[in-house]
Image: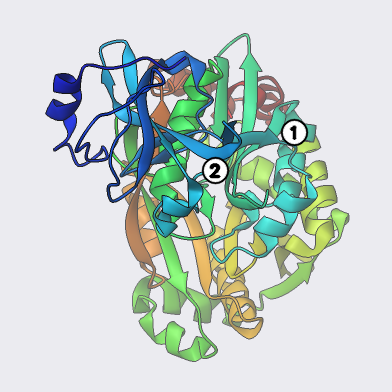
Amino acid sequence: MFFQYPEEKLSNLSHNPTLPTVSSLTNNDGLVKSRKTDFLPQHIGIMQHDDAICCGQNKMLGLFTRPSIINNDVFFIVLSRIPLGDLYLVVLVKPEYLPSNIFRHEFAMLEIIDVLNERWVYFVEHSADTTVFHHPFWSVCLSSSYGYRPFVIVMKDSDDMIIAGLPVMEINSWLTGKRWVSLPFSDHCSPLVQNEDDFDFFTNELINTCKALSAPKVEIRQCLPSVEGFSNGKLYFIHHLKLNNKPEELYKRFRKKGVQYCIKKAAKSGIDILQSSELESLLTFYNLHLMTRKKHGVPIQPQKYFLKLWEHVIKQDMGFVMLAHYKGKAIAGGVFLHFNNNLIYKYGATDPNFMNLYATHALLWEAIQWGCKNGYQVMDWGKTEKSNEGLRKFKLGWGTEEKELCYSYIGKESTEYLAGWKQKVVENTIRKSPLWVGRLLGEILYKHVG
């Protein structure tokens, strides 16, 4: 496996900071041997890259294998990141001579595991940056609604503990093709890492793993580092409202005419707000949602999805429905999901016949106060298309902070299959048709465009 390498070629590499310094070469056993250096390599030779099982990449040394026993001694095989033609420089290093900061990643491997794996559940529930979109119950909801194959790509340390992970759905559609998405119908879903230092390492290894597995097109709903292998797609806006234990202070930041006035008018009109986690309330919202989607010319999600949302998320105390009533009739509603420190305004709907009562404003103000009272730190208003200036203005009126959001891709960016003239046809058809048309189109299309 190892071959003697010409001294003059090794000496040319000796000043490369990614490789150990080679001061002298003496050997009688067919291997090239060096004097003690900063990393004390015991032997240097050349091996075919395909013969190594690479488990991670260190920015200084290169690629590592698991420990190997050679002549009754334990060594790590370190491959240079710089290929020498079709070959790679190999260094055998005793563990005690490796820099201590390497050991976090020398065993780091990416694996695919089940979304309900106990260690993944534990990691999600103890990570500071988790949202409901990372939780296994959300993945189960999507999988059982649309038939997607759920899994998680994780990175483990030497103790076999998860230190980073990304939930993924495999969409296999005859209409839109096969692809991995993290995650469908989720406005954003960033990789979870135990330490910030792991983020770049994990995303780099994610590229390598997807290529090694011949993965289909991969879409990650978060801006990732601009490195070779990733490409970033179109930009959206994302809006967050920071919550605290003084909602009256937040109220002062609302736009007076566009928000405060509407909240006051809704109160004077006698709007009552009901919060519920019951299935009946979600089905009431579904009927309002159907009317709202018809007004905007957008297909509605299958009713099966809402039933699974209630079963796997809301019923598990990670969401609720708010309904605004006027004279005993539900005229507006919202679906809110919550986990960790985040409250997400997922869906909103209003009966078009009662828009002048501003019931949605009353409902959102009630949700904000609930979030403040229950210790949530952020209310997430979801993504907004850059072209939708009206929705953007509405969200900014509540004192939200606006940031740009983009999605990252391994492979080509996903095509928007209902864009341009196709979108116009669908919009006009739904607006001019009975409610069941939007419902039928949703049953047909949603599983393909997730």
> Alpha-carbon neighbours of circle 2 within 10 Å: few (<14), some, or many (≥20)?
many
- Front residue of 278/71: it is 71
Which residue is labeled 1 in the image? 143
Taking 245 as reference, is 21 left or right?
A: left
Identify which residue is drawn at 41% across, 38% down.
57
Looking at the image, residue 440 sits to the left or right of residue 308; the answer is left
Q: Image quarter for residue 63?
A: top left
Residue 424 falls in which quadrant of the image?
A: top left
Quarter of the figure with the C terminus: top right
Q: Secondary structure at mark 2?
A: loop
Amino acid at circle 2: Ala
Which residue occupies the foreground of this view, 66 or 144? 66
Which corner quadrant of the image does residue 395 belong to? Answer: bottom left
The amino acid type, in three-letter code, at marker 1 is Ser
The residue carrying pointer 1 sits among few (fewer than 14), some (14 to 19) or many (20 or more) residues within 10 Å by Cα, namely many
Q: Position of residue 328 (x, y in %)?
A: 79, 68
Q: Nearer the viewer, mark 2 or mark 1?
A: 2
Q: Residue at x 21, y 16 (%)?
A: 6
Q: Which residue is mark 2?
A: 108
Residue at figure coordinates x 63%, y 67% from the top left: 340
